[in-house]
Image (tube, rainbow, N blue to C red):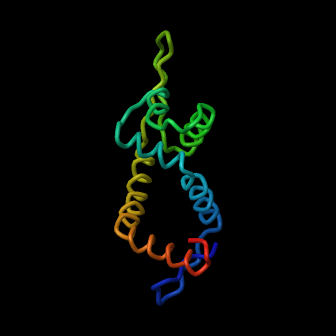
Amino acid sequence: MSKPTAHREKPWPQSDPAVDMLVMDIIGKVADKWTMLILEVLAEHSVLRFTEVSKLIPAISQKMLTQTLRQMERDGLVERTVHPVIPPKVEYRLSDLGLSLGAAFCGVWLWAEGNFSRIEAARTAFDARQGTG
């Protein structure tokens, strides 16, 4: 895996290829909008039922919500609790792993917020040079 080298004087140390593959896999999964939105709503609301998550993310289909929650559970990011009642009651919460991932991505949001006007200016300038703006 090629690691970023900006602002580094020393080369990155060699790492375990299995760890590199895990990083790429996790980034690929977490970088999708649904995982990020589910992380956000579960972080804000602590424990939610499936229908509550669905209402808080109205653009997501039931199928995509089911798939994303299952993948997040498989990766250890979400804990799913089934209560033995009729009708069934299933609740979702972020695990410690999910909470720590959300905290890590909080830095991205803060960076984006702090650089919003610079990014918009760069995009506007690029589009003007390309004749697409």
Q: Is residue 65 above or below residue 39?
A: above
* Residue under the image location 56 percent in, 71 percent down: 133
**Position in image of residue 95 (x %, y %):** 43, 42
Q: Is residue 25 above or below residue 69?
A: below
Q: Quadrant of residue 72?
A: top right
108 or 22: which is nearer to us? 108
Position of residue 40 in the picture relative to residue 6 (left or right):
left
**Position in image of residue 2 (x %, y %):** 62, 76
* Residue under the image location 43 percent in, 58 percent down: 105
* Residue under the image location 43 percent in, 35 percent down: 56
Q: Quadrant of residue 1?
A: bottom right
Count the numbered circles shown.
0
**Position in image of residue 92 (x %, y %):** 45, 32
**Position in image of residue 132 (x %, y %):** 60, 72
Most extreme residue toward the bottom, as rendered?
Answer: 9
65 or 81: which is nearer to us? 65
Position of residue 123 in the picture relative to residue 21 (left or right):
left
Most extreme residue toward the top, as rendered?
Answer: 86
